[in-house]
Image: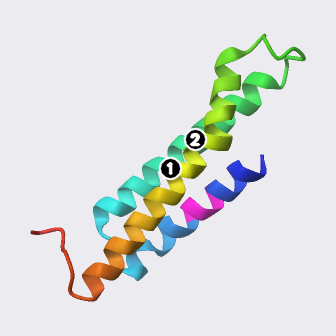
Amino acid sequence: MLAAGATIWMLFSVWLLGPYLGMSRRAGQLVGWALAAELALVLAWSYGTEPCGDRTCAPVAQAAGVAARVDLPVLAVVIILVALRTATARRMGGPSDTA
């Protein structure tokens, strides 16, 4: 649950600070969609496994939990690094979205 909470915190922070850091609108939307996906996965995981004591009774919820704890946090770090790299490159006169 710590990885999912940290991922939500990181994505929400970057989503809020993106316009002030010079991120493109497209990168901000991508971060927003990743945040929505993480929230949906955490909700599916928590509500799907709460009433069940066995590990085999909620396979979809277990898969959502693995995605929320492992897959999406790694993807979120990659998305954030690419978005911030693009923002700093545009600020320094590098590649732009219009090219």
* Residues at marks 1 and 2, CA–CA distance in whole angstroms: 6 Å
Q: Can you say whether 92 is above or below 47 in the image?
A: below
Residue 50 pos. (x, y %): 83, 26
Q: Which mark is residue 47?
A: none
Screen quadrant of the C terminus: bottom left
Residue 5 pos. (x, y %): 71, 53
Q: Residue at x 52, y 54 (%)?
A: 76
Badge 1: how crowded within 10 Å, few (<14), some, or many (20+)?
A: few
Q: Can you say whether 98 is above or below 31 in the image?
A: below
Q: Nearer the viewer, residue 98 or 92?
A: 92
| Labelled pair 1, 2 in contact (Cβ < 8 Å) | yes
| Residue 65 falls left or right of residue 34 | right
Q: Residue at x 35, y 61 (%)?
A: 27
Residue 45 pos. (x, y %): 70, 30
Residue sticking out furthest to the top: 57
Residue sticking out furthest to the bottom: 92
Q: Can you say whether 20 is above or below 69 in the image?
A: below
Q: Which mark is residue 71?
A: 2
Q: Residue at x 18, y 73 (%)?
A: 96
Q: Give yes or no for residue 9 being in the magenta stretch.
A: yes
Q: Residue at x 57, y 41 (%)?
A: 71
Q: What is the three-letter code of the residue carrying label 2?
A: Asp
Q: According to the image, label 1 marks what residue?
A: 75
Q: Main secondary structure of the magenta part?
A: helix
SS under mark 2 = helix
- Residue range (magenta): 8-12
Q: Give yes or no for residue 53 being in the magenta stretch.
A: no
Specify the quadrant of the image occupied by residue 6.
bottom right
